[in-house]
């Protein structure tokens, strides 16, 4: 990025052009292989990551190949055209970093945690702004008439400067001692010592409320939210994995393929090693499952229907036994 100063690809030296073309070919080939892997091509429209990657590859093809052809036809080269705005297309490549979320679940957890904690962060920010405004009014009332100290005039002569100085030096703790020394030095300029020490007390109270209390509370809230999001994501991933295994098991149990599990088919699970393994992984006892599904079959008998339950009904019963139905 530092060495390639060309406005467009066609103005770059050949090593940069070669790398761009090779990367473009690789990503197009990867996308084509992934598209071919879909048994039903319509399912590609349901895959969010595939759609996202398709947009990235389409932008890369436009920038690397189509735009180069257009520039060559229009001006014989990129140097004869105003291509400054086209450099913004290079920034779109940064969006590929989002693909890291798929391979780094911890990063995705942090992003989800930040999103979940946005309300708490906004509330803390509004509280800090309110405290900043109130304390700026108080300090400005007493220090706005001080003209002998250049530092005090530069920091507290107006309400806006007072708010800025409190935020910079108080909330973000940038040079707290300098502010306190400037205020303490008012006594040497002929002002009453009560003014200096009272303003120091007010400033110290502001630091205590914003920097020490609110900011540290915010850190604790964010850490707690991230921990809860991590637990929820891990639980959702585990349940999704278990549901996939359960659906495979239910398909195996449904011998006639009508989407219903009969009482006889469910009892045949005693003879299926796959059923025992999946239920054992779920901490579900097969005999308990047969007992809990008995009322469902009895209801069918009372209503004169065949003793069958749907796959989803049986799936919900199993998840209820495991305690993850709310997920």
Image (cartoon, rainbow, N blue to C red):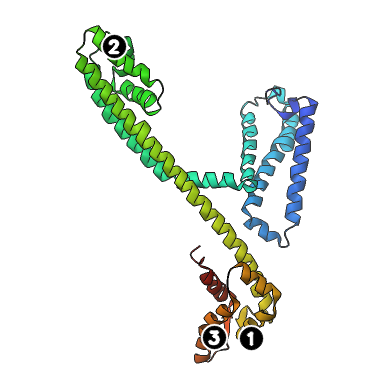
Is residue 140 in view? no
| Crowding at mark 2 (Cα within 10 Å: few <14, some 14-19, many 20+) | some
Looking at the image, which is closer to me, 249 or 140? 249
Q: Earlier in the sequence, mark 3 or mark 1?
A: 1
Q: How far across and how far down the image is residue 23, in percent?
A: 75, 38
The residue that label 2 is drawn on is 185
Looking at the image, which is closer to me, 83 or 54? 54
Q: How far across and how far down the image is residue 233, in percent?
A: 54, 54
Q: Residue at x 21, y 17 (%)?
A: 195
The residue that label 1 is drawn on is 264
Is residue 226 in view? yes
Cα–Cα span, label 2 and label 1 = 92 Å
Residue 256 position by quadrant: bottom right
Q: Is residue 281 above or below residue 253?
A: above
- As helix, strand or loop, the secondary structure at mark 3 comes to helix
> Could you say which disc has been placed on residue 297 in the image?
3
- As helix, strand or loop, the secondary structure at mark 2 comes to helix
Q: Earlier in the sequence, mark 2 or mark 3?
A: 2
Q: Residue at x 79, y 37 (%)?
A: 22
Cα–Cα span, label 2 and label 3 = 88 Å
| Crowding at mark 3 (Cα within 10 Å: few <14, some 14-19, many 20+) | some
Q: Residue at x 65, y 36 (%)?
A: 93
Q: How far across and how far down the image is residue 221, in percent?
A: 42, 44
Q: Select label 2 or label 3 by which is in front.
A: 2
């Amino acid at each position: 990025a530092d060495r390639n100063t060309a406005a467009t690809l066609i103005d770059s030296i050949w090593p940069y052009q070669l790398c761009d073309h090779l990367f473009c070919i690789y990503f197009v080939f990867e996308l084509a292989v992934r598209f071919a892997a879909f048994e039903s091509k319509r399912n590609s429209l349901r895959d969010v990551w595939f759609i996202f990657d398709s947009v990235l590859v389409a932008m890369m093809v436009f920038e690397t190949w189509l735009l180069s052809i257009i520039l060559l036809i229009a001006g014989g080269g990129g140097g004869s055209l105003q291509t400054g705005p086209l450099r913004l297309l290079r920034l779109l490549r940064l969006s590929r970093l989002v693909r890291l979320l798929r391979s780094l679940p911890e990063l995705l957890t942090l992003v989800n945690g930040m999103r979940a904690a946005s309300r708490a962060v906004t509330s803390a920010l509004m509280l800090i702004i309110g405290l900043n405004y109130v304390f700026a009014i108080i300090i400005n009332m007493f220090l706005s008439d001080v003209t002998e100290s250049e530092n005090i005039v530069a920091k507290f002569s107006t309400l806006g400067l007072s708010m800025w100085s409190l935020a910079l030096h108080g909330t973000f703790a940038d040079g707290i001692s300098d502010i306190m020394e400037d205020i303490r030095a008012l006594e040497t300029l002929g002002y009453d010592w009560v003014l200096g020490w009272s303003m120091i007390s007010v400033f110290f109270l502001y630091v205590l409320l914003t920097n020490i209390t609110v900011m540290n509370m915010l850190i604790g809230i964010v850490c707690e939210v991230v921990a809860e999001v991590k637990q929820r994501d891990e639980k959702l991933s585990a349940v999704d994995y278990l549901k996939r295994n359960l659906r495979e098991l239910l398909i195996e149990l449904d011998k006639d393929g009508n989407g219903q599990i009969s009482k006889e088919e469910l009892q045949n699970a005693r003879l299926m090693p796959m059923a025992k393994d999946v239920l054992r992984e779920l901490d579900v006892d097969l005999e308990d499952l047969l007992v809990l599904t008995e009322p469902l079959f009895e209801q069918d008998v009372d209503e004169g229907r065949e003793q069958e339950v749907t796959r989803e009904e049986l799936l919900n019963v199993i998840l209820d036994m495991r305690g993850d139905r709310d997920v």
